[in-house]
Image (cartoon, grey):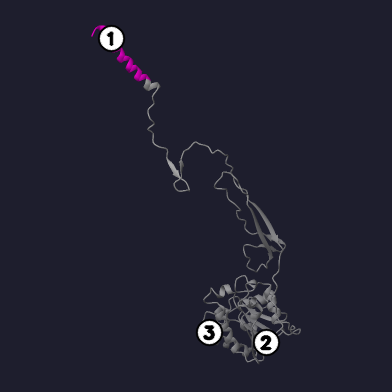
């Protein structure tokens, strides 16, 4: 090999190397060995899309915000200040309106950054009065009939003496009074407030003595309670020998309490009332039962007449009082 051939071989090698280097830089590109784009599963099984796709939807997406209108019906009812007032009423008392507690009417949407405004339309319903329970059509007692009457009793008697006192009658009553406590009890009603049972019993001559006791001892032994009742009758006989004694039945409780209270329920109240009725001879001792006036179809205190399942609303003591004034002995 001469020098020229040697030069040509070296030159060929150099040109080949240069061609290969140039081709790698400007012509061939290595395969992309980056990891595949992650995927997430859609609602339809087996259907996948790239998690970080930059492809925009072919159609514009519209987010629709719905404005919800809520109608709130508010009943306006006038209550006595002595009544329990349900929290969802608007109360009018002495010409002033007391609104119920306001609550939030809506929350921000979790799907958009724009708050959804909630429009609340308040409709005030026309006030409707509950009809009073129907009593019999008997005429009221003649004028002065109750001037010699004494009413003795617990919270129900306090209710009559406070909200619907009978003209001429004397009242002795305390909340929670029972046959076990009458000896030390002090009257809470207006006409005899602060006086003891013996003081009221001996204050004047009575021709009629009404007794309404028993609900506060309905969970106690009936035999002992009836003995206590006999002792009270004996005390009345000793102080007022000519007086007629009227034993008044205990008022039923509502169905809500009857079916939930193992102690104070209408089954026990009826049993107690039956023992009272058995004492009546219809000559000197009488039995008087107001329950038919206030009972519902199932023999429970009608729920529309009570706020606590036990006592009538204040205005219904008027009905009770008027009913009593039709009973003549």
Tell which circle, 1 or 2, labels the residue nearer the N-terminal end: 1
In-image side of 17 versus 207 (left or right): left
| Magenta region, main secondary structure | helix
Q: Is residue 270 visible?
A: yes
Query: Residue farthest to the left?
Result: 1
Count of labels in the image: 3
Kindly indicate whether the residue at mark 2 contacts the one at mark 3 (C-beta within 8 angstroms): no
Q: List the residue tagged with mark 3.
A: 222
Instruction: Find out whether residue 98 is within the magenta segment.
Output: no
Picture quadrant where residue 209 is located: bottom right
Residue drawn at 54 percent across, 74 percent down: 259
**Nearest the eye: 66 or 91:** 66
Q: List the residue tagged with mark 2.
A: 208
Tell which circle, 1 or 3, labels the residue nearer the N-terminal end: 1
Q: Is residue 71 above or below residue 41?
A: below
Tell which circle, 3 or 2, labels the residue nearer the N-terminal end: 2
Q: List the residue tagged with mark 1.
A: 7
Q: Which residues are magenta?
A: 1-22
Q: Is residue 295 above or below residue 81?
A: below
Residue drawn at 69 percent across, 84 percent down: 149
- In three-dimensional space, the C-alpha distance between marks 1 and 2, rounded to whole angstroms, equals 152 Å
Picture quadrant where residue 246 is located: bottom right
Q: Position of residue 146 (x, y in %)?
A: 71, 84
**Nearest the eye: 297 or 201:** 297
In-image side of 297 versus 261 (left or right): right
Q: Is residue 75 above or below residue 64?
A: below
Q: Is residue 164 visible?
A: no
Residue drawn at 33 percent across, 15 percent down: 15
């Amino acid at each position: 090999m001469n020098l020229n051939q040697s030069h040509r071989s070296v030159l060929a090698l150099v040109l080949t190397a240069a061609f290969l280097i140039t081709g790698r830089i400007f012509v061939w590109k290595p395969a992309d060995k980056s990891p595949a784009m992650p995927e997430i599963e859609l609602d339809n099984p087996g259907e996948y899309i790239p998690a970080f796709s930059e492809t925009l939807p072919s159609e514009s997406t519209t987010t629709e915000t719905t404005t919800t209108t809520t109608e709130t019906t508010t009943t306006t009812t006038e209550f006595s200040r002595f009544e329990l007032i349900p929290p969802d009423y608007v109360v009018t008392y002495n010409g002033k309106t007391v609104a119920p507690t306001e609550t939030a009417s809506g929350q921000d949407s979790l799907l958009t950054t724009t708050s959804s405004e909630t429009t609340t339309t308040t409709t005030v319903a026309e006030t409707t009065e509950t009809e009073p329970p129907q009593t019999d059509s008997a005429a009221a007692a003649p004028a002065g009939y109750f001037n010699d009457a004494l009413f003795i009793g617990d919270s129900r008697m306090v209710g009559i003496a406070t909200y619907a006192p009978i003209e001429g009658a004397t009242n002795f009553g305390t909340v929670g009074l029972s046959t076990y406590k009458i000896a030390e009890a002090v009257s809470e009603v207006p006409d005899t407030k602060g006086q003891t049972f013996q003081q009221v019993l001996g204050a004047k001559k009575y021709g009629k003595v009404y007794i309404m006791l028993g609900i506060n001892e309905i969970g106690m032994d009936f035999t002992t309670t009836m003995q206590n009742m006999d002792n009270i009758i004996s005390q009345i006989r000793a102080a007022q020998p000519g007086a007629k004694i009227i034993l008044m039945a205990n008022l039923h409780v509502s169905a809500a309490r009857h079916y939930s209270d193992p102690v104070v329920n209408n089954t026990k109240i009826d049993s107690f009332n039956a023992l009272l009725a058995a004492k009546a001879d219809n000559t000197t001792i009488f039995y008087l039962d107001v329950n038919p006036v206030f009972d519902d179809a199932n023999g429970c205190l009608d729920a529309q007449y009570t706020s606590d399942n036990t006592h009538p609303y204040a205005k219904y003591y008027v009905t009770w009082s008027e009913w009593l004034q039709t009973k003549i002995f």
